[in-house]
Image (cartoon, coloured by chain):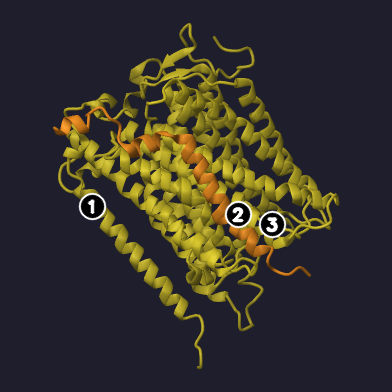
Amino acid sequence: MTPDDSTPTDEVPVMQRLYDRIWLLAAAALAFFAISYVGWGWADVFSVPAG
Amino acid sequence: MAHSYDVLGLFDNEYDDEGFRTCSVTGLRIHHTVENHVKLFGLTAVVALLVGGIFAFTVATTRWEAIGLLGPDAFYTHLSMHAWNLLIFWMVFTEVAILYVGGPMVLGRRLPWTKVATAGWVTMVAGAVAVNYTIWTTSAPNEAPLLTAYVPMPVSPWFYAAASLFIVGTVVAALPFFVTMWHEKRENPGKTLPLVAFGAFVTSIIAVEALVGGLVAFVPAMLWRFEIIEWVDAAWYRQMYWIVGHGTQQINLVAMITVWYFLTHVVAGAEVVSEKVSRTAFILYLFFINLGAAHHLLSDPAVSTGWRIWNTSYAFYGATFASLIHAFAIPAGIEAGRRKRGTGGGLFGWLTSAPWGNPVFSSTIFSIILFGFLGGTTGVMMGQLQLNMTWHNTFATVGHFHATVVLGTTIAFMGLIFFLIRTMFGRQWLSTRLASAQPFLYAGAMGVAVLMMMYVGILYGVPRRTVEVVETIPGTEFSLSAASPLFAIFGVFALLAIAAGVLFVLLAVGSLLFGKRIDGRDGVSDLVADGGLAMAEDPDDPVHAYEMRGTFVLCLVFLAAFVITYLLNWYLLTQLWSIGA
């Protein structure tokens, strides 16, 4: 098998295909923010006893 | 053909039968729907800059206690007007314009949902006017909200309603941008977005986080002040508030960097040395930059130490890394691009031969340098749990965000407006000589004022948000009178910076009203990089074939400054207490 058979020159690299999926990136970033900043923060804030 | 409402002739460019024209500087095909809305939002932003700038004068001359213009009651009202008009309205109106440039304009599309865009503008203006009104008419028992309208501070419920209205208006105004991107990806699924459009998209997602966070904070606060709900948890409010309080400034940052890529390419011939690297940096922003909001809570009791350190240090360093990438990529793009054009002899010939007399270029470069050295480095300091103790709630914090928002974003946006006056409004600057001098005056004076803010905060612990410290505290063990000389330097340079800001507004408005009308390409030839923009697209002459050693040296200088500042801050921290003495 020649290199050209396995890696056609017109194939778009994986990372470029990922970067082109802008809505997927946006959803992942929003989810990460919701977990890292909001969710964890709420868990901390509401674990403080009221009163 | 101008609309009958266009009495000043500001919206009267010539378009073809399909509503497009070709920009003689950028070569972009521009639809009139995009251009007119960019102008609308840009003009409104300048009005906000003018209003906020007026209050910059009263605020600066109050904190410079040799003048002491205002008493406490009036000061907080003026400070609130200053903050909301400059940190929010000037920035956000410009950023919506940038979204329309980065989206439909760069992609050569018309603006969809134009009535929605106009409705968004009307709602934003209504919200901004209402915010100003509620602040200006604040009376006891209510207090002016500053930018941090913390619950349970008694702030007018109508203020929260107005702020929420502005946020809703911004979301509405952003919808046509998202629709544009949706259509673009649906019609060209395998096509990679241009870097500027990609940067604008990242900006928009960061904006969504910030704006939703703002509504989550402000709407319950409004309901509480209207006595519809009984209470709002103060710690929860602060955590939510900073999503918008800090997030809006992150929108500024990413929009600013998108502007850097755009303007350095057009006026200086910069090229993107690595699309992969620059896009990766934008994606790091997308995931990590809004987490930096946590640095405002580093001294708060309710959130855990783990949450604070994770969000501000480990995760946020992803965004710091992205900034360092841009800090290398943009100068490298300028250097390689200019060497390719034959304008880059020696180590720094590419920089010394650059068009420094062009305010679009000089504004952009001052923004890059001053944001990096003063705004970015201090942001990293403040984001560290230990060093934050020496910065928190001191005047140094005010110095930090003036370094980012004024020395960085505002100067970049001023350069953008200089550019739009020529390319979209088709008017020559009222005075080329004054326009050339304005960025030097503004950046120089504001740079010194910002340094003084940092010094009085770090070296003397002068607090932020207060009217007096030097005059009222002397005689106690907390005397801050030693800060007086630095305050005097701050006052003089703050007034000089305000004068340079006034010059910008006069030039912008004067050029639109009285500037000579530009006909044809000759009138804008000085805005195009040597050799034209088409040179960047030559596949046989790749940009990475050119050396970037000048940028490498500059990056080493930056790294050295960063390390010295870091070590100096740690040294100052060790001087806080003499334990056991």
Sequence-first disc among 3 and 1: 3
What is the distance, in whole Å, between disc 2 and disc 1 at their CAs? 39 Å
Which chain: yellow?
B
> Does residue B485 show up?
no
Label 1 secondary element: helix
- Residue that label 3 marks: B237
- Disc 1 crowd, CA 10 A, few/some/many (<14, 14-19, 20+): some
Q: Amino acid at mark 3?
A: Tyr
Residue B476's place in the image compared with B412, above or below, is: below
Q: Tag 2's secondary structure?
A: helix
Indicate the colour of chain A.
Answer: orange
Q: How far, Cα to Cα, is label 3 from label 1?
A: 44 Å
Where residue A38 is drawn, which disc sits there? 2
Q: Is residue B208 left or right of residue B105?
A: right
- The residue positioned farthest toward the right in the image shown: B227
Are discs 3 and 1 located on one and the same chain? yes
